[in-house]
Structures are given as C-alpha cells and as structure tokens.
DNA sequence: CCACAACTTGACACAGTGTCAATTGACACA
DNA sequence: TGTGTCAATTGACACTGTGTCAAGTTGTGG
C-alpha cells in the first residue's frame, strides 16, 4: 500500500543503515546521512521529525528486511520445551550481529533520549515475549528447574540474552559468534532445565 | 600526604557525588556542579581538565570512601572455592547499588567518550580479577564444572555480574537487591559448580 | 498556466563544553 | 610597604550538532 512515488524515504533509510554499518554506529550526524543520501540536511526533517525518529525507523526497516518472524519459525515449531529454548537462543544469537551496528546508536541514545528509550524498550519487550514462551514451554513439560518460577526465569533468560551481554562476550571477551551461541545454549540449559 | 590547604577539590568531588545522587545520574552539567560547590563554572577547570576527568575522579573518590578492599576480605578468606564464589557475588551485589548513581554517568559517557571508556574498562578489569580468583579457587578444588575452562568461566561470571545486568534485574525486572543477590548466588552455583 | 509537492539555500536559536584574558583578594616573605 | 603568586572571578567567545524558519527553485499533473 505504501507505494508512494518518491522513494526518498527509503533512500534515506538505506543511506542511514549503510553509514551506520560503515562507521560502526559511532556518532552519526544528520549531515552525514543527508550527504550520503544526496539531499540537504533539512530535507531529512521533511521525512523524519528528529534524529531519534530516523534511527528508530532505520531499525524497524532493517527488521522487516531481515524478517525476524521467519527466523523464529523454527523455535516456535519445536516439539519440546528444551528444543524450543535452544533454538530460540540460536535464532537470537544469529540475529544480533545483523542488527547490532544499526541498533547500537539506539542503545547509546537510550540513556539520554526519551524516544530512543521507548523504542528500544519496545523491541526488548518483544524479545522478552520469546523468552517467556520458551520458559513456559519448559514449564509445561515439567522441565523448568525447581528454583525458578516463570517470571523469574524469564527475567533471567531475558537479561542473559541482552545485546549488552552479547557485546561484552564478543567484543570484550573475544568470543566468536558461534562460541557465543554454543555457550549460551549450554548455559541456559544448565540454568533452567531440571535434570 | 595530600593535605594541601585548599580543599576545594574535595568540595567539588563531594558536590559532584551528591548532585549525582540527587539527580539519578542523568545529564549532570558542569554548571550545576559549580553552583553546588559554590564556585564558578570556570574554576572547575582549574581542578579537572574536563567533565570526564571530574566524573572519573568522583568514582575513584567514592571508591576510597567505600573501601572495596575491606568488603572483599570475606571473600578472600573463604576456605573453599564454592564459598569464595558466593561471598564474592554477595560482596559485589552489595557494592553495586552504592556506586551505581555515581558510576552511571560514566557508564553513559562510555559509549561516546574515550577517557570514560578507559576509566570504566579499568575498573571492570579490576572486578574481573575477582571473578577470575573465584573461578580459579573453584578449579583448584576440582569443583569447576567440566564444560568450562578458567577463561570462559571467568568471561561468563564477569558478564553475568555486569552493572548493566544488575540494572536490568533491579530496574526493569523489579527485583530487590536481596533477590538479585540470592538469585545470582544460585545461578552462579548452578552454572559453575560441578555436582 | 496554475498549483502543489519535494527540495534547496542560508540564516539562526539553543545547549553545553572548553578556552582565553584581564582582574581581584589573600597570604607570604622580606 | 611592596612584590610575587595562588585561587578564584567575570565576561566573552569558539565550536559542535540539533532543530527551526523563511524564501526561493524545480517538476509534474490537472
């Protein structure tokens, strides 16, 4: 339905994403994005009301392209809770690096910018639902370890899988993404699955 | 030895800390700190070369006051690796909330400011040593679960105990600090200690 | 040809950091 | 009594980046 003639908005989003990926998410300025798109800085404001607005739109746009839903199909289809947990961790672990550079500015702005905070928290809440689903499946199978209840286990899984943790493991600890996934599957099993 | 007559530096640090605690660490401006101290904004620069410099000095100063070393004595004195791990988690868990409001701006600046990043990473490295010591003690007792080696287990413990995670558990998940400590002791036991 | 939309140019307000120069007041020493 | 010096003050200013405003240009469709 959104087939308006001027694809300028899309050009901006693509420019924004590619500049984010080049620069590694550090202070990307409106001027840079405008230049990359080939329009004036002011024209950006004809399409996005603020820098944050643009950043948020970019991650949403990237999300669509990457089709998170398709990636989670596997997890949702899992027979047992244990399988569901593992494949959720795996899907998420493969997803993070793809959105990371684009999501990072949002992560940064989050601490100072109202709108960024709302946008990020919205996305993380969605991710939390996946965690909850996995934990619930485990619970239904009577495989959720006894020291947890659904809420606390969801909290813990959600936190464990946070982007900040992924960042720490892969950037500071030097883990490869595969190591990250393997270790996290192992950890979550140990933590949540009763023997 | 540092008994210089003008305690202005200390007055600044105290003002900075108290304003940080009041405001919850959100955008604290040099002007605010100056006003609180009762001196001109420019005078701050006679004592600290930049905002970051001041922020870093504040956390160091608070650290001294809180005497982290004394708090860890218990952990270091522990007989077994298992005890050591638990008391380390506990000491750290009691420590975070006390430094949090002051450390938070540093945490924020970290993403954009070179110096803040260095300062923070320095502190986290020190914390990591505690993690490593606990894991090593466990290893020495032959109690480190077989899927870990010292490095990877230290990485995992270190990440699990990160301030960002504490933030997520206590602010977003609504855990009390006691719940945080209890759960983390339980989690770390489950994760690292072999049965 | 008119109208409208998308865009351009240039100027500007606003915050907050950091710098600079000239000045004041207090104390020390001699 | 003067001289040096240290801490701090005042006021002005440069810089960066966001967001706003006004006036003008270009192109397309009715």
Image (spheres, coloured by chain):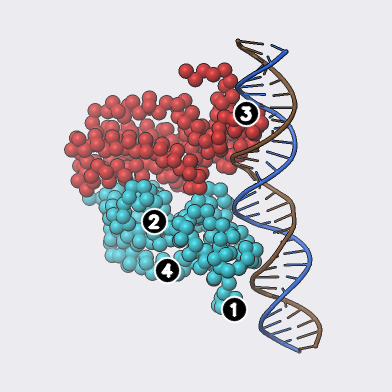
Chain colours: A red, B cyan, C blue, D brown
| Of pointers 1 and 4, the one earlier in the residue sequence | 1
| Of pointers 1 and 2, the one earlier in the residue sequence | 1
The x and y percentages for residue A183 are 35, 41
Q: Are marks 4 and 3 on the same chain?
A: no
Could you classify mark 2 by the number of other residues whose Cα lies within 10 Å: few (under 14), some (14-19), or many (20 or more)? many
Label 4 belongs to which residue?
A: B67
Quadrant in which residue B176 is drawn: bottom left
Label 2 belongs to which residue?
A: B132
Chain of the residue that carries numbered disc 3 in the rendered image: A
SS at badge 2: helix
For the point 39% across and 56% down, which residue is it? B132
| Of pointers 2 and 4, the one earlier in the residue sequence | 4
For the point 51% across and 18% down, which residue is it? A3
The residues tagged by marks 1 and 4 sit, at their Cα atoms, a distance apart of: 24 Å
Frontmost of labels 2 and 4 is: 4
The x and y percentages for residue B109 are 53, 51
Which mark identifies residue B5? 1
The residues tagged by marks 2 and 3 sit, at their Cα atoms, a distance apart of: 48 Å
- Residue B84 visible? The answer is no
Which mark identifies residue B105? none
Is A171 on the left or on the right of A32, as rendered? left
Is B142 on the left or on the right of B7, as rendered? left
Instruction: Give the residue at the far left of this rendering.
Output: A142
Quadrant in which residue B91 is drawn: bottom left
For the point 63% across and 30% down, which residue is it? A43
Q: Is residue D4 above or below residue C2?
A: below
The residues tagged by marks 4 and 3 sit, at their Cα atoms, a distance apart of: 53 Å
Label 3 belongs to which residue?
A: A37
């Amino acid at each position: 339905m959104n087939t308006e003639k001027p694809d300028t908005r899309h050009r901006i989003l693509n420019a924004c994403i590619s500049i984010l990926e080049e620069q590694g998410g550090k202070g990307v300025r409106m001027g840079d994005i405008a230049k990359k798109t080939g329009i004036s800085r002011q024209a950006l404001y004809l399409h996005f009301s603020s820098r944050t607005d643009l950043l948020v739109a970019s991650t949403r746009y990237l999300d669509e392209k990457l089709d998170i839903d398709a990636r989670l199909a596997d997890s949702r289809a899992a027979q047992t809770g244990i399988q569901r947990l593992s494949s959720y961790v795996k899907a998420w672990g493969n997803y993070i690096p793809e959105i990371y550079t684009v999501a990072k500015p949002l992560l940064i702005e989050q601490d100072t910018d109202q709108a960024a905070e709302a946008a990020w928290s919205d996305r993380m809440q969605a991710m939390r639902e996946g965690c909850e689903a996995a934990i619930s499946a485990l619970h239904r199978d009577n495989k959720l370890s006894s020291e947890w209840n659904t809420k606390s286990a969801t909290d813990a899984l959600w936190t464990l899988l946070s982007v900040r943790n992924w960042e720490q493991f892969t950037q500071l600890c030097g883990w490869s993404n595969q190591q990250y996934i393997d270790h996290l599957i192992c950890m979550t099993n140990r933590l949540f699955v009763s023997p």
